[in-house]
Image (tube, rainbow, N blue to C red):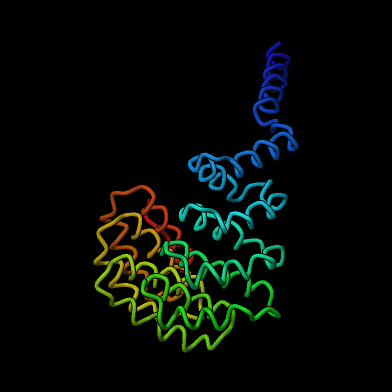
Amino acid sequence: MKLLAAIIVCLLTAVLVQAADKPEDKAARLEKARAGLKSTDVEVRRQTLGSLNHSDLSDALIKEMLEMLKDDDGEVRSMAATAVGTHGEMALPGVPALIAQLKGDSNKEARETAARALGRIGKAVKTNRDAVGPLRQAADKDADPVTRVVALGALAMMDEDVPGQITAMRKYLHDDDPLVRMKACHALGMLGTAATAAAPEIVPVLERETDPHRRGYIARSLGSTGDPESLPALYKALKKEMDGGAKGEIRGAIEKLGGKPPE
């Protein structure tokens, strides 16, 4: 009887899990998402774009997302650049719009995300170099230091004088603005072990950062740049960290560098 009861419980559990996990019909979800992307309500467009990050619908909606690079709302344009930048060759038709966004968008976050998207597309499609010139110009002259940093990182992602871009980004690790410092760490971290030499300069950025969200990004960059000499600073940061999200990033960085976070 006990065995039979156990089998029945297992069967019921399997049925319940299957029902809970059963996805909404994909065609219906696509229709709903398309309607959201075309909504006249800017909040709906923003929320729909945000929901498509890492979504199984994203590839099927690339055309609509590319069109949103010309949206009236700066935040939507910024989010659209982030969304299309992960699609590699599929995003190539959006390169001209992204270049225009990088060159002249009044919204600085839209320029920043355009730069990052162009770097990701250029990294995925090595034969397309259309963005190199605009990225160099942005790295030199954009009014926003964050956009300048991201443009340098994008050029490095495209294998354009990687050592030179890293040297230029390292200067921003000493900027007066903590956001600029964090963005420089993030950009260097995206280059992985190519930026290992920058790790000793990233450590003081982590030590002086007061915002837990930014601390998480900085810790992640230390894990990605791959210098085991960063471990003492990460252990010290973990010991005093109170934010759960930042703790997770610090633990991940420690493990990536071959360390073992304390229980």
| Image spot of residue 227 (x, y percent) | 43, 76
Q: Does the image show residue 158? A: yes
Residue at 69%, 66% (x, y): give it: 93
Q: Does the image show residue 222? A: no
**Residue that sits furthest to the top in the current view:** 1
Residue at 45%, 68% (x, y): give it: 223
| Relative to 121, residue 57 above or below | above
| Image spot of residue 257 (x, y percent) | 46, 69
Tag count: 0
| Relative to 185, residue 12 above or below | above
| Relative to 195, residue 63 above or below | above
Nearer to the camera, 107 or 147: 107
Nearer to the camera, 234 or 105: 105
| Image spot of residue 252 (x, y percent) | 45, 59
Residue at 63%, 79% (x, y): give it: 130
On the picture, is 79 further left or further right than 121? left
| Image spot of residue 123 (x, y percent) | 63, 74
In the rendered image, the quadrant that contains the N terminus is top right
Nearer to the camera, 26 or 39: 39
